């Protein structure tokens, strides 16, 4: 990668048309695909007219409609509520019939019962169909976990993320607290535990210097750098919680990591997510929903849906409604709710952005959120930067290999 060119991609255009490094224009359709600009021409005017022209334009041959990935983010304590656990299984079974799903179980300062997690995974596994598996992730700070318990989860196909940077009750100035002996034992057996470092205002300037030590501690298993506001435990109004970093500091950290640690880009969130949207498409133009759908399940609550910020999840259905719903109707009900909840005409922050159909947008819903302080600028700027950069890389590859999808 060429750092100078990375910074040169920061250019905006008031229409759908974007300028590439080769002086050849490129454009994106509602599927997040590159369109041949010679056939498309410059799109201007209203959003409705632009969308109409884009949908009628020819896209690169051979690209299928992008698949939807449904991520169910579960706060661990929710699994101990019998009705809610049953509802999670019901939803997972319904979604697996139609699309790929990921179940990510998050725990905070209290260590989960590994046996209980294992039994839950086994319960979901019984429901899955051969062609559509459910992928599992257990994410938290494993400071007191024994190696043999972790190995048991690996044997059940559960991926682990070792949370550092911030978790509920973590001092804001603490970046990392790793048990190197634990990670050493895991690494010696050939398993991989990437670090998930939540970035906030108090640690953003220190993380770049700490990455090498963190990689040595987890035996080069990789790391990701999500914003603190992407944690399901984060609540911005709690005074003890640190604020998200400013846009410039966070982008500088991501660019530094992308330049220096590309070998870990398979787990380096949020960059890996943005890469997937560019490669596979960020919007399902037929269903009119993003290709990444996020569900949030918390104890004492039902299911919520969100785009980027779980704190602003919108209630969908409660556990009782879900368990009494016909399993064949749940998927369509979710997509219909998602589409209506996050309609562009309700999103005053994103509805004029030409990149909205590949990004998926931010959680700016209805008038009630206008009075809430949210990190829109930080979330938006890094996504726009890397979407532009990665799309230009894809476009250059297409120019070099025009017959490849």
Image (spheres, helix red, strand yellow):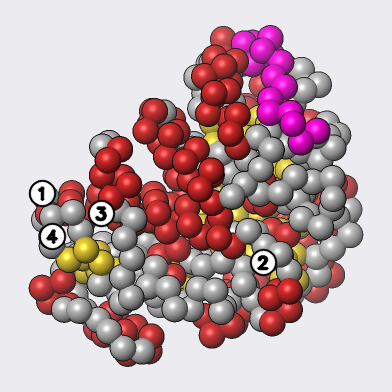
Q: Earlier in the sequence, mark 4 or mark 2?
A: 4
Circle 4 residues within 10 Å: few <14, some 14–19, many ≥20 = few
Q: Is residue 314 above or below residue 241?
A: below
Per the model, the C-alpha gap separating discs 4 and 1 is: 14 Å
Task: Kindly indicate whether the residue at mark 2 contacts the one at mark 1 (C-beta within 8 angstroms).
Answer: no
For the residue pair 239 and 367, the one nearer the viewer reads as 239
Q: Position of residue 229 (x, y in %)?
A: 67, 51
Query: Which residue is painted at 26% across and 37% down in the image?
Result: 2
Q: Is residue 276 above or below residue 170?
A: below
Q: Position of residue 367 (x, y in %)?
A: 69, 82
Circle 2 residues within 10 Å: few <14, some 14–19, many ≥20 = many
Q: Earlier in the sequence, mark 1 or mark 2?
A: 2
Per the model, the C-alpha gap separating discs 4 and 2 is: 40 Å
Per the model, the C-alpha gap separating discs 3 and 2 is: 31 Å
Judge whether residue 243 is colored magenta.
Answer: no
Kindly state the secondary structure of the residue where label 2 is placed: strand
Judge whether residue 182 is colored magenta.
Answer: yes
Query: Which residue position is annotated with label 1?
Result: 400
Q: Earlier in the sequence, mark 4 or mark 1?
A: 4
For the residue pair 174 and 329, the one nearer the viewer reads as 174
Q: Earlier in the sequence, mark 1 or mark 3?
A: 3
Numbered circle sitting on residue 392: 3
Q: Earlier in the sequence, mark 3 or mark 4?
A: 4
Q: Position of residue 52 (x, y in %)?
A: 31, 87
Per the model, the C-alpha gap separating discs 1 and 2 is: 40 Å
Q: Nearer the viewer, mark 3 or mark 2?
A: 3
Query: Which residue is painted at 44% across and 44% down in the image?
Result: 272
Which quadrant would the N terminus be assigned to in this image? top left
Query: Which residue is painted at 21% across and 63% down in the image?
Result: 19
Query: Which residue position is annotated with label 2?
Result: 305
Q: Nearer the viewer, mark 3 or mark 4?
A: 4
Numbered circle sitting on residue 246: none
């Amino acid at each position: 990668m060429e750092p100078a060119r990375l910074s040169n991609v920061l250019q905006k255009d008031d229409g759908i048309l974007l300028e590439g490094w080769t002086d050849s224009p490129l454009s994106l359709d509602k599927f997040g695909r590159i369109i041949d600009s010679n056939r498309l021409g410059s799109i201007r005017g209203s959003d409705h007219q632009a969308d109409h022209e884009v949908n009628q334009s020819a896209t690169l041959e051979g690209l299928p409609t992008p698949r939807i990935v449904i991520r169910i983010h579960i706060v661990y304590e929710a699994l101990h509520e019998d009705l809610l656990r049953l509802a999670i299984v019901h939803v997972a079974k319904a979604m697996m019939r139609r699309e790929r799903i990921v179940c990510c179980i998050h725990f905070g300062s209290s260590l989960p019962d590994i046996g209980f997690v294992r039994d839950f995974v086994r319960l979901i596994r019984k429901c899955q169909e051969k062609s559509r598996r459910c992928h599992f992730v257990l994410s938290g700070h494993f400071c007191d976990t024994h190696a043999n318990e972790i190995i048991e989860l690996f044997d059940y196909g559960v991926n682990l993320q070792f949370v550092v940077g911030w978790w509920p009750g973590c001092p804001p100035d603490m970046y990392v607290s790793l048990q190197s002996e634990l990670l050493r034992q895991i690494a010696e057996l050939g398993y991989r535990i990437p670090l998930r470092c939540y970035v906030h205002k108090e640690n953003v300037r220190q993380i770049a210097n700490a990455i090498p030590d963190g990689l040595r501690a987890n035996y080069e298993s990789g790391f990701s750098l999500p914003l603190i506001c992407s944690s399901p435990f984060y609540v911005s109004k709690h005074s003890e919680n640190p604020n998200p970093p400013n846009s410039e500091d966070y982008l500088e950290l991501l660019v530094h990591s992308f330049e220096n640690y590309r070998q870990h880009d398979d787990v380096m969130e949020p960059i890996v997510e943005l890469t997937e949207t560019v490669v596979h498409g960020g919007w399902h133009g037929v269903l009119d929903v993003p290709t990444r759908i996020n569900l949030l399940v918390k104890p004492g609550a039902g299911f919520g849906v969100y785009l980027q910020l779980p704190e602003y999840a919108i209630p969908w259905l409660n556990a009782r409604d879900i368990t009494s719903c016909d399993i064949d109707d749940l998927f369509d009900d979710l997509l219909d709710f998602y589409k209506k909840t996050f309609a562009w005409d309700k999103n005053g922050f994103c509805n004029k952005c030409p990149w909205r159909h590949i990004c998926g947008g931010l959680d700016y819903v209805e008038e009630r959120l206008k009075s809430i302080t949210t990190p829109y600028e930080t979330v938006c700027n890094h996504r726009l930067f890397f979407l532009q950069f990665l799309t230009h890389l894809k476009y250059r590859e297409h120019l070099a290999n025009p017959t490849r999808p």
